[in-house]
Amino acid sequence: MSSTPVRLADVVPFSWVDGPGNRFVVFTQGCPFDCLACHNPETIPPHPPGTRHQTVAGLLTEIRLAEPYLQGVTVSGGEATAQWRFVRDLFRAVRADPRLRRLTTYVDTNGHALPRVWDALLPVTDGFMVDLKALDPDVHRRLTGRGNGLVLDSIRYLHDRNRLAEVRLLLVPGHNDSADQLERTAAWLAALDPEVRVVVIGFRRHGVRLEFSGTPEATPELLARAREALEDAGLRNVVTV
Amino acid sequence: MELLELRRQARAVIDDPALTYRQRVHRLAAIAENALEPPPVSAECAEALEKRVVCDLYEGNAPYRPRYVLPDYAVLLERGSSFLELAPARDLDEALAHLLIAYTQVPSITGYPVWLGDLDALLEPYAADVDDAELQRRLRLFWISLDRMLPDAFTHANLGPRDTRVGRTALRLERELLQVVPNLSLKVDPELTPDDLVRDAVETVFACGQPHFVNHPMMIAGLGPAYGVASCYNSLPAGGGSHTLVRLNLAEVALRHQGSRATFLDELLPHYVELTAELMQARILHLVEEARFFEHSWLVGDGLLSLDRYTAMFGVFGLAEAVARVLEHEGTPGSYGHDPAADQLAHEILERVAELVATRPMPYCEGSGGRALLHSQSGIDSDLGVTAGCRVPVGDEPALLEHLRTVTPNHALFPAGISDVLAFDETTRRNPEAVVDVIRGAFRTGMRDFTFNLDSNDFIRITGYLVRKSDLAKIERGARHDSTFLGAGSVAQSHVDRRAPKRVVADELDAGPAR
Ligand code: SF4
């Protein structure tokens, strides 16, 4: 299992934006979505030239160097679950290592995975941070190239098992920011659990593909409006970024 | 000094419209002191001093008070002082008044006390029957008094390692008042200091660049349980202090280097370490035997200070340049913070200096076993092209993890403080917990003390002290805090204001008259 390979986009020894505290983050290469608003479109193709190959054992060596300063390890993407065997084996290894076992394990995911993937990851993962690109299936398809049936199921599935750390909403002006969509998203999340942590992220042009760089950025007013809609629906744990 | 020159200097001070009355008095005293001959040393030592290989940091030619005085203020509160005609303090008001009175009577090089004590531990017993609002009100007045009465950023208060109401209130006041004074350190002990207090301190750094973080168990191992962090992060025995701080410029030593690494480590270094020690010794003997400070100071008479708690500080700086030079001579160029071979050599140099200092007897240093204590000296504003202490050069720092891994192994060698500065970017503000993780990790791996900087408040860290950017901007019209003048020199010379992201550079005080 220490030889389980992974296709990597990048590794960051210290990150302050990928879960609680200071975290070692592995960005995997490849994503089944093709989001118009993707900030790292180069991580979407599964096998671009120059992809870095690494193994669980190799990553453990890197994690050990950073360990004293870490609260945990996060696997992000691309899409982490597209290489779920790697995620499972990495987290298993972290938990089996006497020095690393104090670290928490998080997955940052677009939620597009089957229950059997979550079942494989649940025993070794402390929290999942799931993107909800849009509640409306058509909007979702327009934004990501795929429907959101699996995503909504995943959010419920992980919440039922107490491992849903947060739901992330990326607000893209002109696409998923209408009052009506915000309201329905808020109601859906509140029905799931008023305590669920919801992180609202405003769209920024930085990094996105040329075709999409004409889209306006999210304004502070939009973020405030979204926050209000979410809180009005009864959600008590809303953070805007 | 020629009489004419003396007159010229005195005139310049008296006519300088940018100085307050007190600043004039202080500078005039320095001119008078420096009219005397310095304590005698060998010709070789005098030359090293003149060439700035060895530097006494402008302490003055005739030491008549120790460089760092860390009085045991608990003695004052518990027993009172016959010199100050004060009875033991009975309540919070008396404790605060006693402290303020005593601070104005503590001698120092800058004219202001460099250590205010472990304020939370001192005051907590008196705070028990005072409610929160009242505690906040009284400490607020006290905090404002410190900044207005002791306007010098070297004035340093300590908090921790325990969580107290006084400590929490002090942090809140720091965030609210945004003062330059006091400089602040938090002692952190994994057993005694809760994460929540460290986090509170981190949020305080976001607001005003304070406090500095100190590895309490590591300090105790080197200095014993009673210690303080004074001035620019000088850790010393409390109830004592340091007679002097003389520093060796490793970059200058390396400029005189030819040949192999062994020559540098086994011939050049021992030679210059000895010249530095000689100067320290001469200054200590003057202070103790000629000026007889410990025989007449009220602090000694009233039991707040004792000679047997005293030590002396052996400072080093310019490590990065020394490493580059020695490697160049070996034909394998490399730079500290970026090449493992350079980091390795840096550690070897420091280990050698530490060993030499630890075997060189030093008079009147019973506070540290009759030897001087090694200190990584953070520089002064006249240092050009030389890196402060054992830091990686400003602007050249590697990513945070590499930075930590480069400097951490050196921290064990510096019982009198090393004070590295870590740069954190803006994303930290949303995740203070991440900073707590880094602090815990830094201490777990053996860092002794450090500060971190964010670019986005009004403060700029010069060495171990802060000045306000807004004060620097109006320096031509004078400044209420003495240290702002030093800051202006540092900013002009080493571009500390242009570091990206902001990093604490260093500086010690310069009591020189020609400012
Ligand atoms: S799910 Fe994330 S990584 Fe994948 S395309 Fe969308 S934004 Fe990019």
Image (spheres, coloured by chain):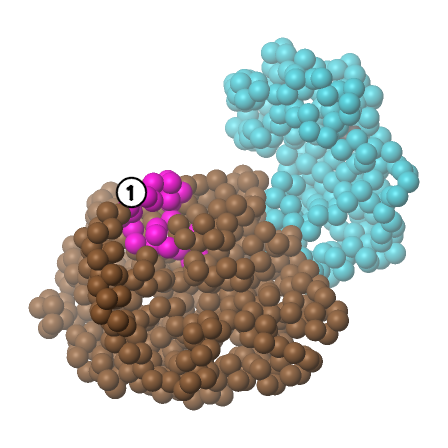
Q: Which residue is rendered at x = 79% and y = 31% of the image?
A: A41
Coordinates of residue A49 in the picture (x, y in percent): 91, 40
Q: Nearer the viewer, residue B499 or B185?
A: B499
Image quarter of the N terminus of chain B = bottom left
* Residue A93 part of the magenta segment: no
Image quarter of the C terminus of chain B = bottom left
- As drawn, B230 above or below B497: below
Residue under label 1: B477
Chain letter, brown in picture: B
Q: Which residues are magenta?
A: B461-486
- As drawn, B22 above or below A45: below
Coordinates of residue B171 in the picture (x, y in percent): 36, 49
Q: Chain of mark 1?
A: B
Q: Left or right of B314: which side holds A91?
A: right
- As drawn, B9 above or below B492: below
* Residue B465 part of the magenta segment: yes
Q: Nearer the viewer, residue B363 or A90?
A: B363
Q: Colour of chain A?
A: cyan
Q: Which residue is rendered at x = 34% and y = 44% of the image?
A: B475
Coordinates of residue A233 in the picture (x, y in percent): 55, 19
Q: Left or right of B319: which side holds B471?
A: left
Q: Amino acid at mark 1?
A: Arg
Q: Which residue is rendered at x = 53% and y = 84% of the image?
A: B271
